[in-house]
Image (cartoon, rainbow, N blue to C red):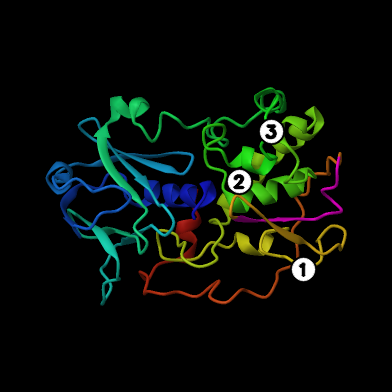
Amino acid sequence: MPELPEVETVRRALAQHVLGRTIASVQLSGLKLRAAVARDLPRRLAGRTFRAARRHGKYLLLDLDAGQTLISHLGMSGRWLYWPELPAETVPHLHVRVRFRGGGELWFQDPRRFGLLRLVPTAALARDPALRILGPDPLAQPPEGDRLHALAHGVKVEVKTFLMDQRRIAGIGNIYASEILFRAGVGPRRRAGRVSRAQWDAIAREIPAVLGAAAERMGTTFSMYRTLWNEPGTYGDQLMVYDRAGQPCRRCGTPIRRVVQGQRSTYFCPSCQGAGRAGTPTRHRVPPPEKPRKGHRGREFPRPDRPRASCRTR
């Protein structure tokens, strides 16, 4: 599932290439996503112009003129694709086609259909049921150790589960929770309420560092996630523990372990993340590249002919 860095990558590309474009027409597949897409969405979007591309946690907030905002969540497999010129063939599982005046289209594709698209008044965003329960965004409001320590007081859930609770911090998912805890030197199975103040300080430092570094490399791709230009993210080569079970720790050489927490895989180093250990930050270390995983850099569909650097612009 795309996490904050992947959604931030999409937001930056949309801000660069879609803002100021006016919608000519919209075509829907008619299929239900996480929730049904409003049938009148094409009529309400026609003639509107994109004014801003924002994000809160894993949610994209695409502001239009006339005081409207299109809320988008990528779910497990959703992706936005932008085509200045249309490809020779379409793609499967295409649920929304936004055609712009002057040419070009923006598509929303979602094979598993857990994504979300909803148009709401911008002034009512704070009351939206999906947004109002979210905690602070950790890039817009970097967390502080004392706040996290106070928030975790008496909490019995494991610290990895705590970090992934969107009501506490919006945007951290399974991949980056493991990476943050490794860099902070905190075991993922330690109860949140028993994490020391020094350890929470280390976690607070690593949250924006890891998420920011991942966003700079366009996120992590294992299978489905793609950028706006249908390219994979490149942060996979930088992962310290995630999906590296049995491989040597990049810091100490101990084999990385995998356990299951809440039906999700957790990866950690039993040496570097031992009890009571607050590790040295490793965010400036660039690990040697590994052999790409199957399909890691493959492309499933054609992409527009364009300079590669443009989608990396902030």
Tell which tag, 1 or 2, sits nearer the viewer: 1
Whether residue 136 is situated above or below residue 108 in the rendered picture:
above
Mark number, residue 156: 3
Q: Which residues are magenta?
A: 264-275
Q: Amino acid at mark 3?
A: Lys
Residue 201 in picture, x, y percent from top left: 75, 31
Place residue 301 in its image quadrant: bottom left
The secondary element bearing badge 3 is classed as loop
Q: Secondary structure at mark 1?
A: loop
Q: Is residue 109 positioned above or below 191 on the image? A: below
Graded by Cα atoms within 10 Å as few (under 14), some (14 to 19) or many (20 or more), the crowding at tag 2 reads: many
**Spatial separation of the CA atoms under disc 1 and disc 2:** 25 Å
Magenta-colored stretch includes residue 286: no
Q: Identify the residue position indicated by label 1 in the image.
A: 246
Disc on the earlier residue, 2 or 3: 3
Q: Earlier in the sequence, mark 1 or mark 2?
A: 2
In this rendered view, identify the residue nearer to me: 47 or 133.
133
Of helix, strand and loop, which one carries label 2? Answer: helix
> Residue 211 shows which numbered tag?
2
Q: Is residue 283 visible?
A: no
Q: Report the amino acid beneath label 1.
A: Gly
Amino acid at dot 2 = Leu
**Residue 155 x %, y %:** 67, 29
Q: Residues within 10 Å of mark 3 (few under 14, many from 20)?
A: few
Q: Is residue 181 left or right of residue 37?
A: right
Q: Residue at x 69, y 34 (%)?
A: 204
Question: Do labels 2 and 3 touch, CB within 8 Å?
Answer: no
Mark 1 vs mark 3, CA separation in Å: 29 Å
The Cα–Cα distance between marks 2 and 3, rounded to whole angstroms, is 26 Å
- Residue 31: numbered disc: none
| Left or right for 301, reference 21 | right
Question: Mark 2 or mark 3, which is nearer to you?
Answer: 3
